[in-house]
Every structure is written in C-alpha cells, then in structure tokens.
Image: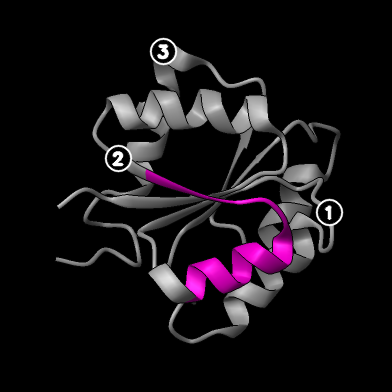
Amino acid sequence: MKDRILYIEDNDQNFYLVSFILSAKGYEVTRARDGREGVDRAAAIAPRLILLDIQLPVMDGYETARELRKNPALAEIPIVALTSYAMAGDREKALAAGCTGYIEKPINPKTFTDQIGAYLSPEQPGRSG
C-alpha cells in the first residue's frame, strides 16, 4: 500500500512539481487548495504525512496546523511546512503552530524525497503498520 501524503497548497505549479516528484517515488499525493479544505480532507483520508503551505487562502498554514492538532485522530500525523517563508523566526513560528518540520521552497528535487522519507520513517510518530 502506498503512503498517502496530503499536500495543502493553493499554487498549481508548486503542487504539480511536488506531486510529480513524490508520485515518481511511489507516494500517493492528495491535494487540498486551502486550509479549511485541508483540515476536512485530512480528517477524511487520514494521510501518513501532511505537507502544508503557509500562505493559503481561507485559513493560513499556521491556523491550519493548529486546527489539525486539535483533532485527536490527526494529532500524531507529521505536518511539514513546505513554504517560501524563510525569514528569521518563520521556522520557529511553524513549529510552534504544530508543524513537525519545515522545508523551504524552492525545493531541491535531488534531496526532497529523502527529506520526505525521513518524516515517514518507522521512528516518526504517526507511523502505522
């Protein structure tokens, strides 16, 4: 069974690049286009990992992470902020909101799947199976 990843991203180009790279490595990537849809979709599909843009419509990534963490069924799923926010303090703000990790855009296609794989390792919380 493929590991399912939910990518909450409103930008089509960003979604297609990440989806292409991860799908080529055998991951199943599902999309939500805004924070509210992301929270609802996560509850419906229970992904192994959530990739979260910070600059989103309806509900920003910080609020989305906090909402995801309120749901006991989703509380242990790793959430990785995947964002172009790269100013001092942005990483800390994402982690404080409930993110497990932080990857800056633009991603490096050569190392991206290894970064993602680290969040899906058996030692990570949320690992099923």
- Which residue shows up at 43% across the image and 66% down it? 77
Query: What's the mark number on residue 110?
Result: 3
Query: What's the mark number on residue 27?
Result: 2
Lower sequence index among marks 2 and 1: 2
Judge whether residue 23 is colored magenta. Answer: no
In this rendering, the label closer to the viewer, 3 or 1: 1
Secondary-structure class at tag 2? loop
Q: Can residue 33 be seen in the rendering of this structure?
A: yes
Q: Main secondary structure of the magenta part?
A: helix
Q: Is residue 6 left or right of residue 85?
A: left
- Under mark 1, the amino acid is Pro
Percent position of residue 65, x then y: 66, 65
- Check contact, mark 2 vs mark 1: CB within 8 A: no
Query: What's the mark number on residue 117?
Result: none
Lower sequence index among marks 3 and 1: 1
Secondary-structure class at tag 1? loop
Judge whether residue 42 is colored magenta. Answer: yes
Badge 2: residue crowd in 10 Å (few <14, some 14–19, many ≥20): some
Q: CA distance from mark 3 to mark 1?
A: 29 Å
In front: 116, or 34?
34
Q: CA distance from mark 3 to mark 2?
A: 16 Å
Task: Note whether 76 is above or below 119 in the view shown.
Answer: below
Percent position of residue 110, x then y: 41, 12
Percent position of residue 2, x then y: 21, 48
In this rendering, the label closer to the viewer, 3 or 2: 2
Q: Magenta residues, as a range?
A: 29-43
In front: 88, or 77?
77
Query: What's the mark number on residue 57?
Result: 1
- Under mark 3, the amino acid is Lys
- Which residue shows up at 46% across the image and 59% down it? 78
- Under mark 2, the amino acid is Tyr
Task: Note whether 106 is above or below 36 in the view shown.
Answer: above
